[in-house]
Amino acid sequence: MLKIAYSPIYQHPLPEGHRFPMIKYELIPEQLIYEGTCNADDFFAPHPIDEKWILRTHSKDYWKDLKNLNIDPKMIRKIGFPLSAELVLREIIIAQGTIDCCHFALNNGISLNVAGGTHHAYTNRGEGFCLLNDVGIAANYLLDNQLAKKILVVDLDVHQGNGTAEIFQNEARVFTFSMHGKENYPLHKEKSDLDIELPTYTQDDEYLTLLYATLPQLIETQKPDFLFFISGVDILSTDKLGKLSVSTQGCYRRDEFVFEQAIKYKLPIVVSMGGGYSPQIRDIVEAHCNTFRLAEKMFF
């Protein structure tokens, strides 16, 4: 059974006109149930995370300031969301959702979080719509509980996973791979274990050729026993923040290939959705739903 982390709190209210499309978190489950890809029993609601797992990844001072809503205004502006207790609760529920997905993936091969992919959150700060790094937290959870020995993070969001790179810069058991737009946010890139920077307007063939050549080789050389996949759909040509020219079909083929590798190498995989900022919400929802459709089709 495909298990999917989702909570109504994922769709957090934002000021009118805000550029982050929170409504996608409501529409994705609705569409998947409506079309019959999933049913209500496939979805589970995570509980708030135990703060010891937050502190395993994020600094004590940052977490204290975050939960007390005592974040510097400059950082709040970099995060891009108005800070509130409900927003912090949302973040810790998303992080627990990714941890819960790990257990389902170990049993079923795959599990997905409707939200997550908050890869711009550093050890000691947040930015870019990210407060806590869900993949970072879940990866450390797996390592500490001896549920994985070597983890490969496959970050295919259009923006570099700078926070994840910083968190694991001295952790040999986690290999960070980020394939992202060269001329896109963040302006200052961190050093992942492997960064592939894509020129503006990169199209399907070039994008997929790079991925096809890179991912199997990484799996062969790094020999991970667990995969995290950040499947941002901000690579789409329609995306107002992406600067790439990948089609919806190209994005579909990307996800299909990542899943093929997980199946081929018998690697459990957890998927966090990452970003998507196309002006038409239907373009975002369709591309995200393709990820779930493929998971259901290929693993079950």
Image: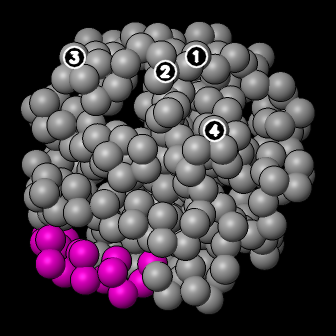
Question: Amino acid under label 4?
Answer: Phe
Report the colour scheme. one colour
Q: Tell me the residue at 71%/45% (across/down).
A: 138
Q: Please give the name of the residue rendered at 78% of the width and 75% of the height, measured from the top-left corner.
A: 172
Q: In terms of sequence position, does the residue under pointer 3 or pointer 2 come before the other?
A: 3
- x, y percent for residue 269: 55, 54
Spatial CA distance of label 4 from label 3 is: 24 Å
Q: Nearer the viewer, residue 229 or 24?
A: 229
Q: Which residue is mark 1?
A: 45
114 shown above or below 136: above
Mark 3 residue type: Tyr
Give the class, few, some or many, for how many residues have Cα within 10 Å of label 3's Cα (few <14, many ≥20).
few
Could you tell which of marks 4 and 1 lies nearer the N-terminus? 1
**Mark 2 / mark 4, whichever is N-terminal:** 2
Would you say 6 lies left or right of 191 here? left
Mark 3 to mark 1: distance in Å? Answer: 19 Å
Q: Would residue 126 be seen by someone viewing this image from the given angle? A: no
Does residue 290 appear in the picture of this structure?
Answer: yes
Rendered location of residue 237, percent (x, y): 11, 56
Dots 2 and 1: beta carbons under 8 Å? yes
Residue interval drawn in magenta: 200-215
- Horizontal side of residue 284 vs 184, given as left or right: left
How many C-alpha atoms fall within 10 Å of the one at disc 2: few (<14), some, or many (≥20)? some
* Residue with the mark numbered 3: 34
- Which mark, residue 43? 2
